[in-house]
Image (cartoon, helix red, strand yellow):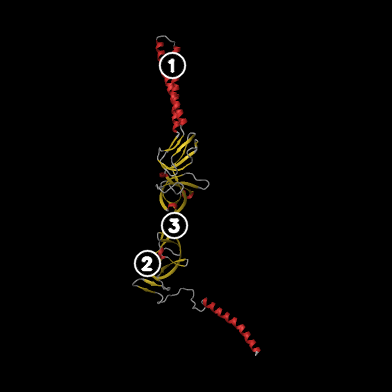
Amino acid sequence: MTHEKTDSSIVKKILTPVIALTILLLMVAWLAGAFNAKVSPTLNETSNEQKHTSLGNKRVTNSKNIMIDQHNSYTIVASKKTILEPVAASLEARQTTIISARILARINQISPRAGDLVKKGDILIQLEQNDLQSRMLQAKQNINGIQARQSEAKRNLARTIELFKNKSVSEFDLDKSRTIYQTINAELISAKQALSQAETTLSYATLIAPIDGRMVDRFAEPGDTAQPGIKLLSLYNPLSLRVEAQVREQLALTLINGQKIEIELPSVNKIIMGEIEEIVPAANTGSRSFLIKVRIAYSGNLLPGMYARMLIPAGTETKLMLPKENVAQVGQLDFVWINVNGEIQRRFVRLGKEENGMVAIISGLVAGDEVVMP
């Protein structure tokens, strides 16, 4: 009896893992579809139960039991569209001005600040002018003194001429009086020139706006010393904004003055039209590109230095467009239903850029394919 129990225990130990392994293999085979009916990888002819056509409402049921509306179909048409090459550009002001002093003087007052609008002739900076006014007054007094001497010399010359006629003085005395009078006249002319120079120098103490424009920045404050040629203010004319870009030579040579091109302004989410007003007739030797300047219409939200893109025509391309609603998805794959000789088939496609409810077809369809709406 002990021997029989031992044999039975050994058999159980062997059969238990074998049975468990067999059950596991059967489950794996079942999950893999080993017990399902096999279908060869060929096109199946749809039976009358799988596919039927109703002439009344023109709806078709394919083998996948998906209803297709043949009325809502779209035939793929190839169309040529212009390729627009974006070129990085920036907004620049055609009319800009740097305000600087022409004399060495202390700044008394600066009126505008960055962003302020100014009119032509507005006072921008007032420099110290006490010393300049003193020079001008000195020049005026010098003129008054010379004019008094001129009057005296003129009377002396007139008396000398009368005396010379009466032979009371010599010709030497007459020439001497005439020389004195002419010398004083020359001094008077020189003094008037000095006064004019002093007045001009005094005018340099008041800096005015040369154009209508908007202030960009100020580089000095009251109390600073203005030096000749050192910039104090900068301003530009907002009405003179334009777009400038370096365009590769092969593309730039296709452009002409007066040509209309599109300008994209990403910061304001806007596309505007511009007109080429200048093509610099010399290429940049480093980048082999030409500087293109495009005139644009005035807009209050545009400022110099903003980023823009010139959309320059660079040829044409053939595009296949399809309404976005005709495209279906399975997972991450896009597909459409097409009518092929009366049979509805599924066709996977690769999509491109979407425009106004239409999407570009990169691959999967050709011109003439009839796409139906599921």
Say which quarter of the image contains residue 139: top left
Residue beneath disc 1: 178
Q: Which residue is mark 3?
A: 317
Task: Give how far across and how far down residue 39 sits, in percent.
Answer: 48, 76
Real-space CA distance between mark 3 and mark 2, rounded to the nearest whole angstrom = 28 Å
* Circles 3, 1 touching at the beta carbon (< 8 Å): no
301 or 84: nearer the viewer: 301
Is label 3 or label 1 in front?
Answer: 1
Report which residue position mark 2 lands on: 72
Which residue is more in the foreground, 122 or 324? 122
Q: Quadrant of the N terminus?
A: bottom right
Picture coordinates of residue 367, whole percent (x, y): 42, 63
Please name the residue shown 40% across and 16% down the image. 155
In this view of the protein, which residue sits in the foreground, 273 or 134? 134
Q: Amino acid at mark 1?
A: Arg
Is 24 displayed left or right of 212 in the figure? Answer: right
Packing grade of label 2 (10 A; few <14, some 14-19, many >=20) is few
